Image: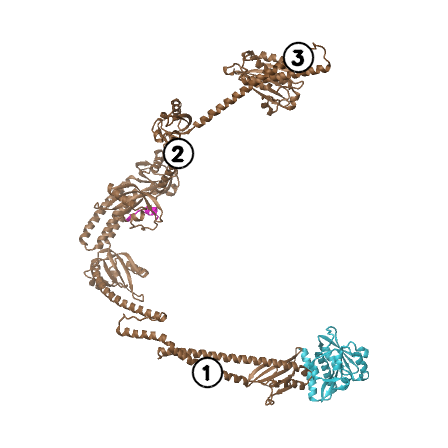
Chain colours: A cyan, B brown
Amino acid sequence: MRKLCIILLINSFVFSAIVSGEVNETVNLEDKLKAVFIYNFTKYIQWANNDTSGTFIIGVIGDSEIIIPLKEIGEKELVNNRKIEIKQCQNIWDINDCDILFISASEKNQLRDILNKVEYENILTVSDSSGFANEGVAINFVIVEGKLKFEINSNTINKTGLQVSSHLLKLAILKENGKIR
Amino acid sequence: MISFKGFSIKKELVAIQLLTTFTILVCFCLFLGINNFRLFRKSVISQLTSMAQLISANSTSALQFLDNEVAEEVLSSLDAEEDIVNAWIYDSEGNLFAKYGKTGYTDFSFPKNDKESYDFKGAYFTLNKRIILDGVVIGMVSLRLKTNQFRRMLFHEIIIAFFVLIIGMIFALLLSMLTQKNISNPILHLVEMVKEVSVTENYSIRAEKKSENEIGILYDGFNDMLEQIQLREIERYKAEEALRESERNFRSIFENATEGIFQSSPDGRLINANPALAKILGFDSPEEMIKNITNLAEQIYFDPSKRNEFISLMAEKGIVKDFEFRSKRKDGSIIYSSVSAHDVRDENENLLYYEGVIVDITARKQAEEELRQAADIFSNIQVGLYVYHLEDIEDDRTLRMIAANQAAAEFTGVPVEDIVGNTLDENFPGLREKGIPQKFAEVVRSKTPIELEDFYYGDNRIIEAYFTTKAFPLPNNCVGVAFDNITDQKKAEEALQKLNEELEQRVEERTVELSKTNENLRSEIQERNRAEEALRESDENLRSVFDNMQDAYYRTDKDSRLIWYSPSAAVMLGYENPGEMMGIDVATNFYADPSKRDLLLKELSEKGKVTNYEAELLRHDGSTITVSTNSSYYRDKDGQISGVEGSFRDITSLKLAEQVLRESEERFRLLVQNSSDTIVILDAEGIQRYVSPSIERITGLKPEEVTGISAFEILHPDDIPLISEKIAESIANPGSTLRAEYRHRCADGSWVSLEAVATNLLDDPRVNGIVVNTRDITERHQHEQELYKAKEAAEVASRSKSSFLANMSHELRTPLNSVIAMSDILMEKYFGKLNEKQEDYIKDIRDSGQHLLSLINDILDLSKVEAGYSPLEISKVDIKMLLENSLVIVREKSLKHGIELLFEVDDDVQDIQADVRKIKQVVFNLLSNAVKFTPDGGKVGIEAHLEKEFVQICIWDTGIGLSEDNMEKIFGEFVQTETSLTKKYEGTGLGLALVRRFIKQHGGKIWVESKIDKGSRFIFILPLEQTNKNK
């Protein structure tokens, strides 16, 4: 029940922002919405290592405000009955134990290194930088006509071995490496 | 209820059937319609629910990621569903998220709903369903369906139902028109008939029955009813006739009855009365009575309270019988009357009036009163009565009082409780010397009463007075003792007699008076007769009871019907209720064999009375008893026979005892007849009174040939002295038993030996003779003879053997003497010296020869004795001298062994008659035995003294002794006590055998007393003189 209330609260927050079109705290609201989306992805994606023990780790590499709303969610929600740990990754060597890795825009320069590192790992990579999807990030947030949408790179998904629900795919803008389909 | 009033039965039947069909069809159509609607609704809901589930499943992700375009895309898939016209999706807030509408329905305002539900509204059906992801409600989907399809279907169904209804009704109409005739026609026929009967009043018409169902039953019932009515009409007519007749009869009875008939109201008025009633109460006419009497209680009842009693009895029972009261006549005189009445009520049970009959019972009442006075006087006589029970029939000291009446207690001054339970002697010890207990016991035993006139008695308890006493036997060994003071009784008797005379005189006067005045009044005559009868009977009953206390008593009328009986008769026959046997035909109900009653009556008519007539009577429970009856005629006042009376006594147990006795006698007789022994009963003169049949088997003489003759006629003449002696001895000793053997003559003249055991039972009244039990012993005699012969033969054989032995011994002795003599000569060495070995051998030969010789001598002697070739040669023998001399023979040997010889013979032991040689040998044998078996340093002695006609001689020693077993054996041939001893002490083993033979030959006796290792005493006795037979 408590959980339900919280989601309703978040949703109302998000919707009110969208509907009113206020821009005072645009960045903040957008980050919050992205964090909710990241959490919702876990419901439509199945990780290959069906590990039910331990914590579900969401890592953030680079500087991003998104870590704040993520931590709020992580304190209150569970993924497959696992606690959520939000981790600030300092460098490329710090990302291996993540289940989801958010790659900040600031990491554009070493994006290739990061992706190489996680290419065949069972890690869902997420970013919010234009063109990242084409570079090989699995899911990339974009704003289309004032609405938050997301792109999915099917090549990357296939490599990581993650199972993505068709419902999610139906909502996404599908990308492949290097071009727009 | 639907009313068909005014319809004919035909129309009514059709209408009922149509209505039924219509109702069924409408109900059926209604059911179908409702069911179809329910099924349709159910299918719509399930269709819509699955559709909503599909949509919600496909729209969760769109809701999660806020993509309403995708959601509307999902909804647009509803284009395929023709009837779903609108669809909406709401988010969790309830805000519209996506919508869908078919052409023409786009402007439709959306319903707002936040819970799962469905409803039919107007032409549309709406369903709301939640969208749920991971247990969380994230939105709502609503679907709207247009329902015009359902309406179409409903319309079609109604049309079809209407047509079905129309067709069904037409069929039902046709069918009912056809079938109603089956029911309506017979009923109409019946209706026609009812009309005819009611118009013509002809009840003989009958309906014609056509079927067997309820209509048929109705016809039968109707016909029965007509028949009943017809019969009742006839009966009613008859009843009316009878009523008229009975009305006439009743009127005539009412007018002419000799008994008074009345009807009276509860408030004491007379409603109706007949002339007889008027006459009884002294009025001139019934009308006068009815007019004058306004209060019955005051005017008629002598005691008005009796009227109240009568009314309360009526209220209680509704009927009153023989209610007796005294009534006042018109002239004021009093009569006794008896009323029997019942109440009459209307149909609501309200009392209307009383109705009844009144009889004048004055005559009877007076008679009863007089009788009561007589009974009072009787009770004043005060006869004392004691009942004793003789517990032991043989002992008059066991007379124990079991009952006493109060009169006796008052009379003697001794309370009842002080004496009942004690014996007569305890109560009245003085009576024994007057012989009273003995007399009472005799009454019990002989069953005959005794009377003791002027009996004077008194002791410390009873005031001295003169008594007259009557003791009479009662059943069960009891004796009743009635006693009285003579003066009192005499006075009472006189009073009774006088009173009886007065009574009779008065009754007679009364009879004359009554017969003169009331000849027409039958009831009064009956009353008088009854009174007279009661008086006479009671009088006689009293007498009878007095005379026959222990027996049952009865009286029958001329037709053998029981008209009176004593309570003891009812007890004897097992009837419990009083009066139950009254009026019963005696012959057929009580006699087990009714012809026995006829025999009794026949005997009665021949002799005038019957005594001790035995018959079997049936008891109430069906069992039978044997009774002995004494009967005689009883006569009325004029001496005419009016019946039979008598007493009877239960003798069942007596009969039973008699039967048992007879049976046991029968058994005994059979036993005697079938016995192999012959039983003869002799009287004191020796006449054979009875001879049992087995005599024929033994002697061939028939029992009747030898019965009644003297026992001596069939005896062998040689046996007569013996048997007459035995008979005399038997007669002299009553009860004694004697044995004798005698020879009995047979039919063919031969003789048979019998053994007889005779018992004198002359004193036994049942036998009164000498019972002789004889047995055929001819065979036994023969056996004895044979046995004797066999014994003789055996003895001859034994003697031959002995003589053979004697001869043989002699032949053996002759050569042996030569052997011994020759070896003696050799030992004397007359013919030269012998070397040492030769001398030893010769000695052996001589010793063995001598041993053999002594052995042969002994055998010879023994066999001689046995064969009877060694007779005693009796001479005078000085036994003392003989004993002294015999010591010499053993002296040498005893000296050798240091044995002391002792001699103790009395001086009077001198000459006896005996065979000196044999006695010498006896003494020598015993002495040498004594020395032989006595160890060195022992003692051997001879003792002798006279013992009456014998001399007793004892030879004793302190030797090795004998065991008890051997004491008997040693006197046999070739016996020495032990084999071990035989070697140590040589001997032939024949010595003691010879000793015994010789002593026995002399008529003496030898025995031994001995103890092992202590010594032996051989004692023998010899008679002083020899008789012939000992030789």
Decide which of B462, B56 is in the foreground and name it.
B56
Q: Can residue B564 be found in the magenta stretch?
A: yes
Q: Is residue B498 above or below residue B965?
A: below
Residue labelled with disc 1: B163
Few, some or many residues within 10 Å of mark 3 (<14, 14–19, 20+): some
Quadrant for residue B85, please give it: bottom right
Quadrant for residue B754, please give it: top left
Magenta span: B562-574
Q: Is residue B762 visible?
A: no
Name which of mark 1 and mark 3 comes first in the sequence: 1
Name which of mark 2 and mark 3 comes first in the sequence: 2
Q: Nearer the viewer, mark 2 or mark 3?
A: 3
Please name the amino acid that badge 2 sits on: Val
Q: Return the chain for callout 3.
A: B
Coordinates of residue B458 in the picture (x, y in percent): 34, 37
Q: Is residue B794 visible?
A: yes
Coordinates of residue B298 in the picture (x, y in percent): 25, 60
Q: Return the chain for callout 1.
A: B
Please name the amino acid that badge 1 sits on: Phe
Residue labelled with disc 2: B672
Whole-number angstrom distance, CA of label 1 to CA of label 2: 120 Å
Q: Quick check: B962 left or right of B613? A: right
Coordinates of residue B855 in the picture (x, y in percent): 61, 18
Decide which of A117, A93 is in the foreground and name it.
A117
Q: Return the chain for callout 2.
A: B
Q: Secondary structure at mark 1?
A: helix
Please name the amino acid that badge 3 sits on: Met
Residue plotted at (51% across, 79% down): B35
